[in-house]
Image (cartoon, rainbow, N blue to C red):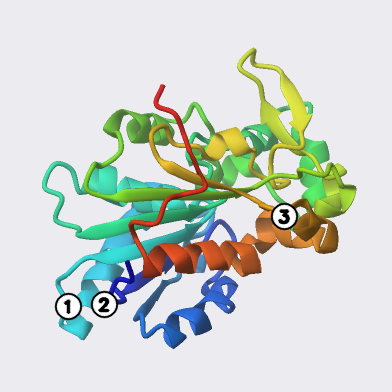
């Protein structure tokens, strides 16, 4: 069933900017969906995620007032932007649930914490990994101890503990869109040979093709919610492997098609479903 377009709140990720949505915004405009782009680049590294969530809450309130709109919205996030939105909805807005949200769509989100953030802080592996990513994913020079966001998305952080304890809201449809290197091609994320770092349940570090180069698939999954693992067809990865790396997901045509499908038809089934633990 096609739904009338709702305002769409866009939340970018770590050390990014609202321009990352330049392929999605025209699609939203063509569908007559109001587009509210939240930007927080000035807060990257200097502000904890809870503070950014407060800023997001204020932004949505201002946009509602300007539009004269009090109904539900959809929220689309990239990477740690999903953690910001979840903190707003599941922690700050609990138990009142004053924020009316129909769907929360996370693209490559570290919902369970980021092994990469933890790796940055590792005394042995951290400097080498940071050096390899410098200039592309992290600035030069870079000290993770001074980055409030990185500290917050470490799996064992107080922030992630609060988010886990809060639990998901039953009045919001959660969607997770992730990419994995199903062909094992190095070209997907050449800096790590097409693999993604993750920490196993045994506490040991390993590299896996089940990820987008930055976020491992199992870091994104939320029990009991819908999930799309892309690409659906291996040929898409073979034709343009770099489109499926973490940094390019918000501009990936297949990702955008899934986002628009959910915005048009919020009852649409996800391609897979995360089992409840």
Q: Looking at the image, can residue 60 be seen?
A: yes
Q: Splitting the image into 4 quarters, where does residue 166 fall?
A: top left
Figure quadrant of the N terminus:
bottom left
> On screen, 26 above or below 44?
below
Task: Please give the label number shown on residue 63.
Answer: 2
Residue under label 1: 69
Instruction: Tell me the CA gap for discs 1 and 2.
Output: 8 Å
Q: Is residue 135 visible?
A: no
For image coordinates 43% across by 68% down, the residue present is 10
Left or right: residue 232 versus residue 107 is right
- Earlier in the chain: of badge 1 and badge 2, it is 2
Which mark, residue 14?
none
Q: Give coordinates of residue 272: x percent, y percent.
A: 51, 41
Query: Is 207 placed above or below 92 here?
Result: above
Q: Position of residue 268 (x, y in %)?
A: 39, 56
Judged from the image, the secondary structure of the residue bearing numbered disc 3 is: loop
Left/right placement of residue 220 relative to residue 56 reads right
Q: How many marks?
A: 3
Q: Secondary structure at mark 1?
A: loop
In terms of depth relative to the viewer, which is nearer, 137 or 94? Answer: 94
- Snapshot quadrant of residue 134: bottom right
Question: Residue 256, relative to residue 50: is it above or below?
Answer: below
For image coordinates 38% across by 29% down, the residue present is 161
Residue that extends furthest to the top in the rendered view of this protein: 202
* Mark 1 / mark 3, whichever is N-terminal: 1
Where does label 3 land, which residue? 245
């Amino acid at each position: 069933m096609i739904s009338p377009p709702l305002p769409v709140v866009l939340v970018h990720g770590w050390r990014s900017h609202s321009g990352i949505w330049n392929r999605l915004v025209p699609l939203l405009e063509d569908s007559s969906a109001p587009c509210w782009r939240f930007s927080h680049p000035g807060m990257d590294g200097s502000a904890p995620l809870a503070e950014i969530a407060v800023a997001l809450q204020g932004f949505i309130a201002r946009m509602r007032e300007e539009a004269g709109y009090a109904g539900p919205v959809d929220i689309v996030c990239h990477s740690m932007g999903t953690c910001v939105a979840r903190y707003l909805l599941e922690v700050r807005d609990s138990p009142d649930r004053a924020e009316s949200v129909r769907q929360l769509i996370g693209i490559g989100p570290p919902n369970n914490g980021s092994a990469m953030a933890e790796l940055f802080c590792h005394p042995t592996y951290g400097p080498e990994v940071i050096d390899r990513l410098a200039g592309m994913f992290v600035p030069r020079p870079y000290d993770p101890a001074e980055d409030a966001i990185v500290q917050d998305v470490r799996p064992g952080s107080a922030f992630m503990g609060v988010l886990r304890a809060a639990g998901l809201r039953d009045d919001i449809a959660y969607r997770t869109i992730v990419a994995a290197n199903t062909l094992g091609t190095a070209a997907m994320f050449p800096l790590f040979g097409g693999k993604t770092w993750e920490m196993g349940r045994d506490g040991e570090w390993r590299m896996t093709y089940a990820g987008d180069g930055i976020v491992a698939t199992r870091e994104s999954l939320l029990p009991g919610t819908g999930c799309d693992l892309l690409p659906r067809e291996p040929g898409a990865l073979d034709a343009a492997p770099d489109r499926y790396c973490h940094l390019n997901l918000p501009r990936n045509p297949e990702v955008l098609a899934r986002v628009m499908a959910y915005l048009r038809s919020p009852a649409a089934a996800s391609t897979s479903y995360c089992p409840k633990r």
